[in-house]
Image: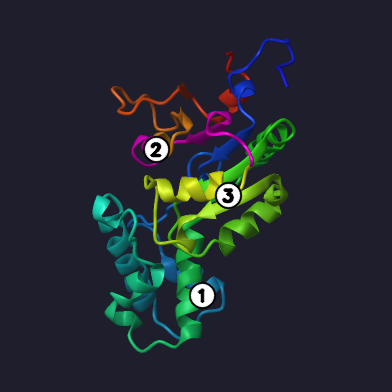
């Protein structure tokens, strides 16, 4: 489908659009800074067995365990689970499975963000002309993300959703891209991937043989290797970028 002016757009050359989630169409993510009080989140979900210091220590230790391995290529196809990360916190020793699940939900609430009405509307517009899928690196269970998608009215738009926490691989490994591509009966040259990270999204998509668009939510990034096929200010550029 062409733009309202009748001019062909870049995305008209593709049948399938695979999307990153975090900082591509979901924002307010990865809230693990020093100002965060994870105990408040824990208590807001009914947690009352652990003290504030213990809750904060488990979440921070888990985050540090994962982030320290995130950029190491040795872990791209053997990335630890959130269960493993929490096991590294001495404050988590001896906790029963129910309490550990509550702590993992606390972690997820801080890793997950929100989808604004504007971005939800954009995704609906894209879904009217293209088949959509997701390839996303997340550490917690996908349930919190699915709840956010459902509440934003976009869950039904995606034919295939690949979240790294369901696997041992993370982007830029081609494994997750192949998992997504396999769900669509489309040749590789008709599938486009869009994400905000040169190292994880663009390198991963290119390694899997896909065309890739980089959204410049963090500002211009020079001298990219491999270079994306297009660079856009944000995801909205997809619906107005000319051929």
When the figure is inspected, residue 227 is found, relative to residue 21, above or below; the finding is above
Q: Is residue 142 magenta?
A: no
Residue drawn at the location 44% of the way across and 36% of the way down: 196
* Viewer-side label of 1, 2: 2
* Viewer-side label of 3, 1: 3
Return the disc, 1 or 2, that comes first in the chain's sequence.
1
Looking at the rendering, the stretch of residues picked out in magenta corresponds to 185-204
Work out which quarter of the rendered image holds the C terminus and state it.
Answer: top right
Question: Which residue does the numbered mark 1 point to in the structure image?
Answer: 43
- x and y percentages locating residue 174 in the rendered image: 41, 45
Say the numbered circle drawn on residue 197: 2
Quarter of the image holding residue 200? top left
Question: Which residue does the numbered mark 3 point to in the structure image?
Answer: 114
Q: CA distance from mark 2 to mark 3?
A: 19 Å
Residue drawn at the location 62% of the way across and 43% of the way down: 184
Report the side of 223 relative to 176 (left or right): left
- x and y percentages locating residue 147 in the rendered image: 64, 60
Q: CA distance from mark 3 to mark 1?
A: 21 Å
């Amino acid at each position: 489908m062409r733009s309202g002016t009748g001019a062909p757009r870049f995305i008209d050359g593709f049948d399938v659009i695979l999307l990153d989630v975090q900082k591509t169409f979901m924002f307010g993510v990865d809230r693990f800074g020093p100002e965060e009080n994870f105990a408040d989140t824990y208590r807001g979900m009914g947690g009352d067995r652990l003290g504030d210091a213990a809750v904060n220590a488990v979440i921070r230790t888990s985050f540090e365990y994962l982030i320290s391995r995130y950029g190491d290529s040795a872990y791209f196809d053997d990335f630890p689970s959130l269960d493993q990360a929490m096991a590294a916190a001495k404050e988590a020793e001896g906790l029963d499975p129910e309490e550990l699940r509550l702590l993992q939900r606390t972690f997820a609430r801080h890793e997950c963000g929100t989808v604004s009405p504007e971005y939800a509307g954009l995704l609906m517009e894209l879904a009217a002309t293209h088949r959509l899928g997701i390839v996303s690196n997340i550490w917690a269970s996908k349930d919190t993300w699915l709840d956010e998608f459902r509440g934003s009215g976009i869950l039904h738009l995606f034919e295939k959703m690949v979240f790294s926490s369901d696997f041992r691989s993370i982007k830029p490994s081609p494994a997750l891209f192949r998992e997504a591509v396999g769900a669509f009966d489309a040749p590789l040259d008709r599938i486009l991937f869009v994400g905000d990270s040169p190292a994880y999204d663009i390198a991963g998509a290119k390694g899997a043989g896909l065309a890739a668009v980089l959204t410049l939510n963090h500002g211009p990034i020079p001298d990219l290797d491999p270079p994306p096929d297009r660079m856009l200010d944000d995801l909205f550029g997809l619906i107005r970028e000319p051929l």
